[in-house]
Amino acid sequence: MKKKSSEKKRHVVAWVNKAEWDQVLEYLYSKDSALQRFALQRISAWKGRYANSTPVAVECTADLVRCQVLDRSSQLDGDDLILLYGAALVRFVNLITERQQGKTARPLRRLAGNLNIPEWVVDLRHDFTHRKLPTLKWCRKGCKVVLEWLQQEFWSRQLGGGPNSDWELQSDGEEEEMDLKQQEDELIARQKEMEAYKNARELLISFEKEQYQAVGDREKSSWPGPFADMSWLLGEIKQFALESSELLVDVLLEDGFLVPTVEQLETLGCDTSTPIQPRVPQNFLRFWLPLLKMLNSPSFIHLLLEKLFVELKLLTKEQNNHRTFYLSAWISEVICCNSNKFEYHFETKAQKKNRMKDRIFVNRIQLRWQQLLSACLDAPCISTPHLLQLILDDMEHPLPLETRQRLLQLCSIYTQTAHSERDPSPEQKQQPIYTLESLQEKLQHSWRHGKSWRSTANSERSESSQEYKWADVQAEKAKALRGSPWQVCVDKVQWKNYPLGKVPGQSDDPSCLMVENYSTMTVFDQPVEMESCTARSIPGGSAAVRSADGLWNHSDVNKLKSGLQLF
């Protein structure tokens, strides 16, 4: 059998030996036109020996090299060269892709792509046959690229034992057989996928029917876990999840399952309006708890979160608030189940026990936090700030506080939603204005405190005008004090932050005001000034001063003056 197989692969060649082959290959790709002409003559001899079975790659190479030789000879003008290059390139694309065609015609671009031929070469061939002729520059470039492709895919593989060295010698029957087999495999795989999808929907629809029947028989607020007659159905769903978990999750996230319709919500007694916080309604959560608890595993939770964010990202271009809400609600439900931080301290033990029954899982799972954070930011929606807050609060290794605050602020700006922290700081309450909504909120806030936009604008104008006046006054003062030891302070100092008599940088220690050299004098050294000042300060010119006990006479004032000293 091996001998017959080896004999089947043997074929007669036109070249004498490997040396002649190597010589022709070297001369074809040289820059010397004389050597290229010699190589073309040898190929003409080979074609005589081959008759009608000359390899396609050899003929295409000879045609393209002949174009290069005539181009260098300057014997033809530009239009003639364009037509010559065009004929060679059209023959190359047609002959090389012809063997890839089956019984039904397929696009040349796809066939050329399978052979690693650049798509723009096929477009060049299309321009030659159907449109305006390309320029000579593009013709030369196409010829160069195609010759490189032929050298790599054909010439370098011959007599070298490389893979696919005889690709151009394969028969049409073998290629058609391979194509048919590939198409059959794709068709079988597609049929299996459709059958699996159909089975997944049938299983989930059966689960819904059983649950709706249980709802009709029992009170909505006291649904039990899986019923006895549902164990077989849950077992089948679990077995299907082991084989095709991704497909099951994809079906679960379709409308009518984890994303309920309005009719389903009304049947379960749930509110059909959309709340502010994305949380799954309690009755709807209990409806799916038997299935989700049965499927509960770290791998399933990871896959569910990943698919939820993928579906949420697809809705960024579509306005579907209902679907966005429930996808976000299930993400929030899973993260809250995984967290121990969302505890209600006012609950009784019985209330806490009932609430734990409504959780998909109880034990904490090591989630892929960085992946969840990236997926959350890649799917911006109205619920993104809320989901981002949950992720940042529950991360195993939390980000720095400043980074979290900036991330939440940027997220609220991008999604144009109000950003609210659990414990907002005063700095966060005074957020800058980025959107029209934030501007309106700030206006309403100012109106609530007795302010109006007009007064704010007027105050801004007055402040601006005061700044200009202040600059003029400072300039006049500086001109008046020119040559004086005093100077005008030009620094913009917020003097309201400093008490009277204190300057920026001054220490609270009074000793800093003392000078090294000083002298003292008594108040009586200036009796006239002090007396006149005292007389002017007392109404009616009386020399008496009122104290807490009554009036001081002149002798009392003199006693006070005698004890005063001036530095």
Image: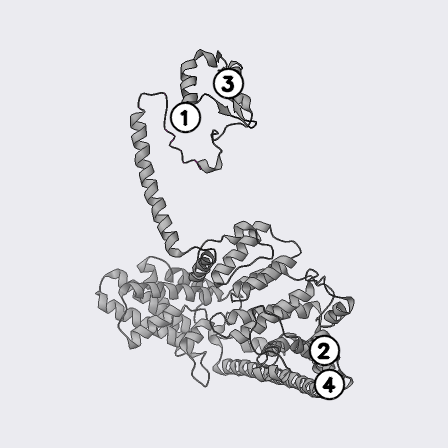
Question: At numbered mark 2, what does the secondary structure look like: helix, strand or loop?
Answer: helix
Q: Which residue is mark 1?
A: 540
Question: Which of the 4 quarters of the picture holds residue 394?
Answer: bottom right
Rendered view: 288 above or below 26: below
Rendered view: 148 above or below 315: above
- Chain-order first, disc 3 or disc 4: 4
**Is residue 371 in view?**
no
Depth-wise, is mark 3 or mark 4 nearer the camera? Answer: 3
- Chain-order first, disc 2 or disc 1: 2
Is the N terminus in the top left, top right, bottom left or bottom right quadrant?
Answer: bottom right
Mark 1–mark 3 Cα distance, whole angstroms, equals 17 Å
Q: Which residue is mark 3?
A: 557
Label 1 neighbourhood size at 10 Å, few (<14), some (14-19), many (20+)? few
- Chain-order first, disc 2 or disc 4: 4
Q: Is residue 271 left or right of residue 435?
A: right
Mark 3–mark 4 Cα distance, whole angstroms, equals 100 Å
Q: Which residue is mark 2?
A: 290
Q: Count the labels in the image.
A: 4
Q: Which mark is residue 218?
A: 4
- What's the residue at 51%, 19% (across, down)? 553
Mark 2–mark 4 Cα distance, whole angstroms, equals 16 Å
Report the span colored magenta.
Answer: 482-494
Report if residue 535 lies within the magenta region.
Answer: no
Q: Give the x, y percent position of residue 77.
A: 21, 65
- What's the residue at 34%, 73% (across, down)? 125
Query: Mark 3 is on which residue type?
Result: Val
Q: Give the x, y percent position of residue 463.
A: 36, 45
Question: Which of the 4 quarters of the picture holds residue 68?
Answer: bottom left
Depth-wise, is mark 4 or mark 1 nearer the camera? Answer: 1
